[in-house]
Amino acid sequence: MNVRTQLIGGAAALIALAQPQVSLAQDCISKREVGSLVMYMMPIAIDSVDQACSARLSPDGFLARGAAEMRERYAAMSDKEWPNARRALFKFARNGRPAEADDPFDFSAFPDEAVRPLATAMFGTKIRNAIKVDDCANYEEALQVFSPIEPNDVANLVAFIASVAKVKNPSVCKEPQE
C-alpha cells in the first residue's frame, strides 16, 4: 500500500470514529471546525489506541517509541483549538440539528471547565469502544504515517476528505468559491 493510500485511509478512519449514527442533517460544520476537532481529539485517539493496543504490539513499534512525541505535538495545540472543537462537538452531539432552546442535551451554556473534561471522557470512551484489537497494527501504522506530517496539514487533509466524502450529521459546510 502506498503512502497516499495510507493517508487517505487514515483520514477516513479518523472521520469514521467521530461520525454519529443518526441521519438528519440541518446544521453544518466548517472545515476549520473539523480541523480543530481533529487536532483536539488526536491526543485522545492516541491515548485510546495506546490503552487498547500496547499489550498487543511490539515494544519496538511506533506506538511504544514515537506516539508520545506525536501526542504532545497535538496536545500543545489543544487549548488554541478548543473553542472551534467545542463548537464542532456540539454540532455532532446534536446530530446536525440546529440548537433548540429547550434541548436537554445542550451543554453550550456550560463553562469550559465543566464541558471540556466531559467531552474528553465521552469521546475517549467512544473511540476506545470503536477500536478493534485485531486492527491494532493498522492503527499503529496510521499513526506512524501521520506522525511526520504537521498537525495543521493533517487537520486540513481530514477536513478536505470529510467535505468531498459528503460526511453527514453534521455535513461539512459548502464554502464560497473565490
Image (cartoon, rainbow, N blue to C red):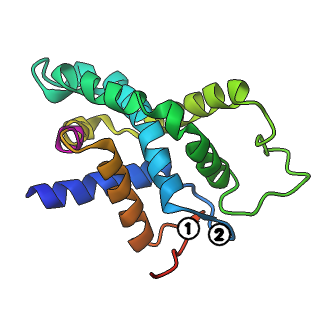
Check disc 1 and give the amino acid type.
Answer: Ser
**Region in magenta:** 141-147
Residue at x 76%, y 30% (from the top left corner): 111
Q: How many marks?
A: 2
Q: Residue 148: horizontal and vertical position, in percent?
A: 18, 40
Position in image of residue 27 (x %, y %): 67, 66
Mark carried by residue 25: 2
What secondary structure is marked by label 1? strand
* Front one among 21 and 117: 117
Q: Are marks 1 and 2 in contact (CB under 8 Å)?
A: yes
Determine whether 146 is above or below 169 in the image: above
Q: Is residue 67 left or right of residue 164?
A: left
Residue at point 25% right, 57% down? Answer: 9
Q: Quick check: 44 above or below 9?
A: above
Which residue appears at 67% of the width and 69% of the height? 24
Q: For mark 1, what is the residue?
A: 171
Classify 10 Å Cα crowding around label 2: few (below 14), some (14-19), many (20 and above): some
Label 1 crowd bin: few (<14), some (14–19), many (20+), radius 10 Å: many
